[in-house]
Image (spheres, rainbow, N blue to C red):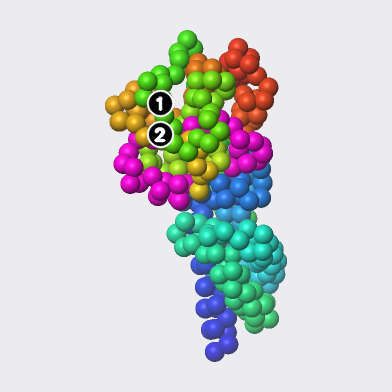
């Protein structure tokens, strides 16, 4: 009876880890942003770390179900759970407004407190299994372990490569100015920023676009990382009734914004969204989408470079 219970519990933990990894992987963008916002301020490292966490969960989950090297894997699992729990305790104390700790991605949203309770159950179950679970004696255990390891740590990166593997380059724009005929009034502009004066970032978003919402969140994180209040403008297309939902789902800072007609919007944004323009005194310098957003570009554009220097910078491979 005890042996049957241990096999059921071990399989359950394995399935939880596999589901957790899957939920973070599809879509991985939310988990990348979560790490970027709450732990690692370097975007490229955040994308790598996200995949390491996912791969580790896949590996542990699969090996637990196969039930080889169970003592070693269960001890490693216990260590992981303790580390994750201490991180969750930190979030619970210092990030009080966190509604989703991303343990199960966007599929099952748990607060840090709820996830701590879940981890306490998993820790207790893992300790029980360390003493009462027995491995299966199957052939080619080492080979199986190696195959699972390489599959778990390669497939997620193959399916969703980090941005730096296939980087999206800045699209340069020459001899073109920003058309402000429909951009003459922005709500929520207490600093009275001018869209065609100095260096500005102008972001074209659809109110229902998933990647637009993620771009808005990423820009807000970069802005906060640099401890600045850049002149950033949001230009929306869509129904105003969806505006509050956009703010809530993107978790974006409420930058100056306007909503313009679809025809005028797509004349300036182009076909792909989001469209984010680096603008210097009304002149368009470069355009980028969600994947091309880079904190280094922000620093170089707003802090270091003048108009002609910015163009040469964005031309770098």
Q: Is residue 260 left or right of residue 277?
A: left
Residue at 56% across, 58% down: 98
The answer to whether residue 142 is seen in the rendering is no
As rendered, which of 137 and 2 lies closer to the eye?
2
As rendered, which of 47 and 183 lies closer to the eye?
183
Residue at 68% across, 81% down: 131
Report x, y in % for residue 185.
41, 29
The magenta stretch is: 221-250
Distance in Å between CA atoms under marks 2 and 1: 7 Å
Circle number at residue 258: 2
Is residue 226 found inside the magenta-colored segment of the image? yes
Residue at 44% across, 36% down: 187
Q: Earlier in the sequence, mark 2 or mark 1?
A: 1
SS class of the residue under badge 1? loop
**Residue on which the image places disc 1:** 183
Report x, y in % for residue 134.
63, 78
Q: Is residue 25 left or right of residue 306?
A: left
As rendered, which of 187 and 95 lies closer to the eye?
187
Q: Are marks 2 and 1 in contact (CB under 8 Å)?
A: yes
């Amino acid at each position: 009876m005890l042996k049957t219970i241990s096999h059921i519990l071990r399989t359950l933990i394995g399935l939880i880890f596999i589901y957790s990894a899957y939920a973070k992987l599809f879509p991985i963008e939310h988990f990348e942003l979560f790490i970027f916002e709450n732990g690692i301020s370097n975007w490229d490292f955040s994308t790598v770390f996200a995949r390491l966490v996912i791969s580790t969960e896949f590996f542990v989950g699969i090996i637990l179900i196969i039930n080889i090297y169970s003592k070693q894997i269960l001890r490693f699992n216990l260590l992981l759970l303790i580390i994750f729990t201490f991180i969750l305790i930190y979030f619970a104390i210092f990030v009080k407004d966190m509604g989703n700790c991303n343990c199960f991605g966007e599929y099952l949203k748990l607060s840090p407190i709820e996830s701590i309770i879940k981890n306490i159950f998993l820790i207790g179950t893992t300790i029980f299994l360390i003493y009462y679970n027995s491995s299966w004696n199957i052939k080619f255990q080492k080979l199986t372990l190696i195959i699972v390891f390489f599959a778990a740590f390669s497939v997620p990166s193959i399916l969703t490569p980090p941005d730096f593997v296939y980087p999206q380059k800045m699209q340069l724009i020459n001899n073109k100015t920003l058309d402000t005929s429909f951009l003459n009034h922005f709500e929520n502009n207490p600093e009275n920023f001018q869209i065609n004066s100095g260096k500005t970032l102008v972001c074209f978003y659809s109110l229902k676009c998933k990647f637009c919402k993620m771009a808005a969140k990423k820009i807000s994180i970069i802005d906060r990382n640099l401890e600045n209040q850049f002149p950033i403008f949001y230009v929306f297309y869509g129904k105003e009734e969806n505006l509050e939902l956009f703010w809530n789902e993107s978790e974006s800072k409420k930058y100056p914004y306007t909503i313009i007609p679809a025809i005028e919007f797509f004349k300036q944004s182009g076909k792909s969204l989001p469209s984010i323009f680096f603008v210097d005194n009304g002149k368009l310098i470069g355009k980028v989408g969600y994947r091309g957003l880079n904190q280094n570009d922000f620093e170089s554009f707003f802090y270091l470079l003048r108009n002609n220097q910015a163009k040469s910078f964005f031309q770098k491979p």
